[in-house]
Image (cartoon, helix red, strand yellow):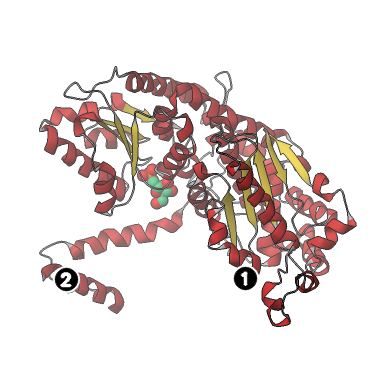
Amino acid sequence: MTNTPTPPLTSRPAWRALAAHHEAIRDVHLRDLFAADPARGTRMTATGASIFLDYSKHRASPQTLELLFALARECQVEERRRAMFAGEKINITEGRAVLHTALRAPRDARIVVDGVNVVPLVHEVLDRMRTFTDQIRSGAWRGFTGKRIRNVVNIGIGGSDLGPEMAYRALAHYSQRDLTFRFVSNVDPTDFAEATRGLEPAETLFIVSSKTFTTLETMENANAARRWLLAAIGDEKAVASHFVAVSTNGPGVEKFGIDTANMFGFWEWVGGRYSMDSAIGLSTMLAIGAYAFGEMLGGFREMDEHFRTAPLEQNLPVIMALLGVWYTDFFGTQTAAILPYDQYLARFPAYLQQLIMESNGKSVTLSGARVTYATSPVIWGEPGTNGQHSFHQLLHQGTPLVPADFIGFLSPLNSNGRMYELLMANMFAQAAALAFGKTPEEVRAEGTAEALVPHRVFEGNRPSSVILAPRLTPATLGTLVALYEHMVFVQGVIWDIDSFDQWGVELGKTLAVSIARDLDPGVETPPERDSSTNGLIERFRAARDS
Ligand code: F6P
């Protein structure tokens, strides 16, 4: 499928101007940018939906930003944003609307897809989720033997796992602590074994989460769960009280044996990696309750409104997206770090890996041409301060340039002495050390032996954003996730790619299914593949047979 060709990105006037401007600014040090403009640290900030962004420690001058905003306008970011919110089919390779924003639209909103207002559908599912949540949390919903549900196991992978697990961990502070939550994703049987270890089957609810309800890993784990339950309870009828499904595929759910009355639906216009606030968030709602889940949706909505209405120059997702393009395409950076200074956000980098890389890890434009510029960087990260004692060495003194996002909260959820102040001090210190470094003169002035001076110099000029929110709440989590969702969208528009398909996952899936037939016990026929894969298959068979 193709789309009307747009002018190649690299021939746009703003792109060319940025390339020329980069020649002039690439060696300018942040120390000099700050010295030349004492107000820089307050001027290059923006606030939206209660998120504060300090982007002053980026290798960008007012002219850089002007050109980046011009690029956004030339690439029609505003028109494309309108099209997305309006439900136009901007996922052109799948012919689908992209409407995760409808998942948090207020009840009285109207968003029409193929002649149907989807907002009432969204709220109908939310209402059913609320009723179910109240039943589980109050103990009204009982397992097959009459016991109360005490354990919830979400089975899913990719967007049907990373969002729920990230959100559960992020909002653990708000969770009902007498309910145990576990998450199973991998087809590695170890994952299921460990996730169910110690759980009482009669008290366990499985949520089988899969948009398609065909994903190999999820179906295998769901079958494993049914075997595990039935081995303990021994009556097929128990499935009805211990399994619910979240999916767009009613027939698939029914075929598996889950009553569609216990199915929570969503729609093809919600991408898997954009689905944590759909019914895919059922485990989140069970953990934090319906009210707090509503607060989370409110946070998403606030950021949607900010993104939809704020001028580009004050628009957080736009600013972050453009700076990302600046580094990826002009400085040639290949990775970007996400560094939350909050232990509750331990899985946030993993969540963003899928959101960003599955969306923008593309090399073909909307019209099917090979791109001639770089698209998504590799995303990685860990919570601070832990990362400081492992990979920050490379951030400070390594050869690659790695733009980083520091994410922190102004007030803590747990206090203990001055530990929280130390956490935040470390975050501010890292951003400053990366930006300003330490000169040879400063190192010498400390009395360092000359031979050690080069080792102790920090060249600095390493860019970062600092993202601050008042406190980690369900609403704040919603705003943060929406911030990155919209950042990804803007970058996809600039790069002229389809951010909402994922054809790159297909080949491996098909090959795995076919190779699995070669690994079936009893199959002895020599594999007819490449010599490397044949060798690996033979080695696996030999080990199994011995
Ligand atoms: O294989 C990639 C992918 O399709 C992701 O995009 C998606 O989030 C994940 O698999 C799980 O898909 P499903 O929810 O359909 O099981």
Query: Residue 429 appears at what percent x and percent y?
Result: 68, 54
- Seen as rendered, the residue at the extreme bottom is 451
**Element type where label 1 sits in the image:** loop
Q: Are marks 2 and 1 in contact (CB under 8 Å)?
A: no
Q: Earlier in the sequence, mark 2 or mark 1?
A: 1
Quadrant of image for the C terminus: bottom left
- The image quarter containing residue 375 is bottom right
Q: In the image, is residue 182 above or below residue 514?
A: above
Q: In the image, is residue 521 above or below residue 113?
A: below
Which dot marks residue 543? 2
Point out the frontmost of discs 2 and 1. Answer: 1
**Element type where label 2 sits in the image:** helix
Residue 378 can be seen in this image: no
Query: Residue 401 appears at what percent x and percent y?
Result: 65, 66
Residue type marked 1: Gly
Query: What residue is shown with label 1?
Result: 398
Residue 53 can be seen in this image: yes
32 left or right of 46 in image: right
504 left or right of 42 in image: left
Q: Residue at x 68, y 33 (%)?
A: 50
Q: Residue at x 13, y 35 (%)?
A: 232
Q: Nearer the viewer, residue 505 or 542?
A: 542
